[in-house]
Amino acid sequence: MLPLYADVKPCLLELQSLEIPLAIVTGALREEVALVLERAELAQYFELIVSGDDITTSKPKPDGYLQAIARLREQYPQRQLLPQHCLAIEDSFPGMEAAKRAGIPVVGVAHTYPLHLLQRRANWAVDSLADLELDRIQALLSEIK
């Protein structure tokens, strides 16, 4: 069994209900990410993966996020996607910095660091994915629909 957070799948189901295209931005290799997603039965929730295979720099550089936006913009030209219309869900300081450098709002999830430290760096922070405020995410998305 994979060591995944219990609230991952319910969170993805809720985000999917909002018809949000989801992407993964990671420094891990695509093959590794694909294997984990497949084994966890989560692959169907993600439109694309920007992995260490796609970028030459890693977080806190914004390159991965910028590439994800560009690729989503190609897939969904009608959305006129801008960084501020996206949301990065991050649990690490380098990830939060990368998203912010790309112009993307960040919600910090207290998986790696305590909530009070994330609150200083993220636009907002939650203890777990179960605490994500979907109405707040919907408000962000309503600007681009």
Image: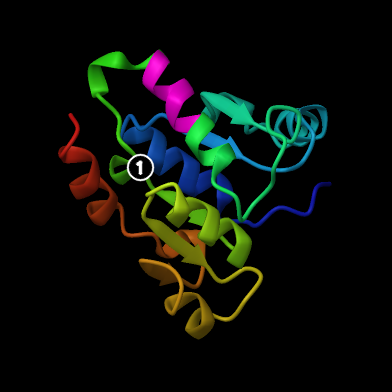
Residue located at (68% from left, 33% from top): 55
Q: Is residue 99 visible?
A: yes
Q: Is residue 92 visible?
A: no
Using residue 79 as the reference point, say whether residue 64 is left or right of it: right
SS category of the residue bearing label 1: loop
Vertical arrangement, residue 110 with respect to residue 30, above or below: below
State the image quarter where residue 42 is shown.
top right
Using residue 64 as the reference point, say whether residue 143 is left or right of it: left
Q: Which residue is mark 1?
A: 86
Residue located at (79% from left, 34% from top): 29
Residue located at (23% from left, 53% from top): 135
- The amino acid type, in three-letter code, at marker 1 is Cys
For the magenta stretch, what is the residue range?
A: 68-74
Using residue 135 as the reference point, say whether residue 100 is left or right of it: right
**Neighbourhood count class around disc 1 (C-alpha, 10 Å): few under 14, some 14–19, many 20 upward:** many
Using residue 51 as the reference point, say whether residue 121 is left or right of it: left
Report x, y in % for residue 27: 72, 43
Queried whether the magenta region covers residue 101, the answer comes back as no
